[in-house]
Image (cartoon, helix red, strand yellow):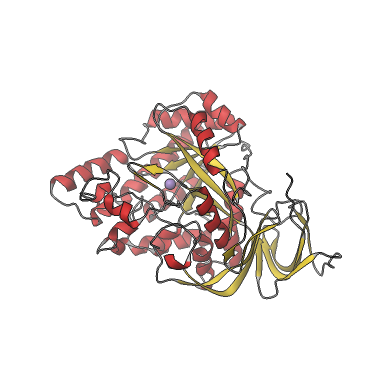
Amino acid sequence: MLVRGAGMLIRGGRVIDAGGDRQADVRLGDDGRIAEVGADLVPHEAEVVHDAAGKLVVPGGVDAHTHMQLPVGAVRVSDDFASGTRAAAVGGTTTIIDYVNVTRGQGPMAAVAQWRALAEPAAVDWGLHLTFTETVPESVVAAGVEAGITSFKLYLAYPDRLQVDDGTIVRLMRFARRQGALVTLHCENGGAIEELRRQALAEGRTSIIEHARTRPAILEGEATARAAVLAELTGAAIYIVHVSSANSLAAVRAARQRGVDIQAETCPQYLYLGTGKLEGPDAPDFVCTPPLRDPWHAEELWEGLARGSVQTVATDHCPFWRADRRAGVSARPGGARDFTEVPGGLPGVETRMALVWAGVNAGRIAASDWVRLCCEAPARTFGLWPAKGSLAQGSDADVVVWDPERRQSLAAAELDMVVDHSPYEWFISRGWPELVLSRGRVVARDGRFSGVPGWGRYVARAPRAY
Ligand code: MN
């Protein structure tokens, strides 16, 4: 069955993409692609016309870091691909790239096949990254690239189940360079953190704030610097996921000055939320890794976004029910015994575009930065450009008509993500999508989902040129 978009002319909006920031009309063809962008386009007969006067017209958002449906110990992420992509659409994101985690001893391509089956009900387009938790042969990297998976993740933390040693990192970087892939890295010094956690528990320091105290920013900075050195050694391109601290950002900047091909991603939680959230009865609802930092780190990150030293904002979308956070990953009778048992991760796929847009309202970044950070850079970095993240003729008609005056509460009850809390309960966004299209099909209108499960397609990503 071939489902086609109907074709549409979006008139009179402020169009922002890599082609500039200008008043223009955008024509979406009935093939699901951008047909034409220009001034004063004349409607075709029977063409649907959407008046975008006073609105912004931007490429659909690309969220390069999500975890739908992921099992973590005895609990599971509360959004599946159907609900998570529905929420993404409502918030203006039309492509996600989800992480397939290959557990030790599991076959990587079997894990990919399992994840592709889980993602079938997605309402918007989706790609996959592959996470290795042990060394793999080059043929696995080649098979991934062949299947359109052109980024591979390694953890420098969580020694019990995810962390790899430096030799494994060097090996994967060499393979990635030869196969045209990007290595993404979770940068925290897992061994040192493990010791700090043991020490905290031995001293009876079990409360949630210890999650932050045992994962200090200097250990994120150290791991980022080490990853950068290994990239320098191997010539591989790397991407640091969820940079949360000035320490890590400084390591990224220093490496780039040496000529290392390194990019940084941050997430809205590190721009808006601080360590103070980790005290009080709601503290379990704010556990994520890296942990929330002292607020001055957020200032550095905003500065990095404005100056281009942080290239991408993704979400690390990884929601859990409040009850599951309190039950803990071991589902122990009586609940989580201490901070080490709380599943870490926050909801975010629906609120990213709005939270970064709030930086435009606040004068921290320009509207064109918002588009670059949320749409264009992730598409370019992960081999989706120019099909995604662009409004050029021939690009996929993934389009957001953004109403800069529309008010939207970011409280859980007002959102579509399947989870019973929001890290931004108090936040009223000024700015929200009026219309969201995925390959020419309207998937959200006036803040309500209007797509269908299964509309989303797998997007094979292009390898990078070294
Ligand atoms: Mn993650």
* Front-lying residue, 182 or 97: 97
Query: Where's residue 434, x and y in %?
Result: 62, 68
Q: What residue occupies the far front of the structure in this picture?
A: 1
Q: In this view, does 334 lie above or below 413?
A: above
* Front-lying residue, 465 or 17: 17
Query: Where's residue 36, x and y in %?
Result: 79, 59
Residue 311 in sight here: no
* Front-lying residue, 209 or 126: 126
Quarter containing the C terminus:
top right
Q: In this view, does 169 lie above or below 199?
A: above
Quarter containing the N terminus:
top right
Q: Residue 281 falls in which quadrant of the image?
A: bottom left
Q: In this view, does 410 lie above or below 118?
A: below
Q: Is 107 placed left or right of 33 in the picture? A: left
Q: Is 198 placed left or right of 176 in the picture? A: left
Query: Where's residue 371, x and y in %?
Result: 60, 60
Q: Is residue 68 above or below residue 28?
A: above
Residue 179 in sight here: yes
Q: Residue 166 falls in which quadrant of the image?
A: top left
Q: Which residue is drawn at 52% across and 29% down?
A: 109
* Front-lying residue, 259 or 94: 94
Q: What residue occupies the far right of the structure in this picture?
A: 45
Q: Residue 14 falls in which quadrant of the image?
A: bottom right
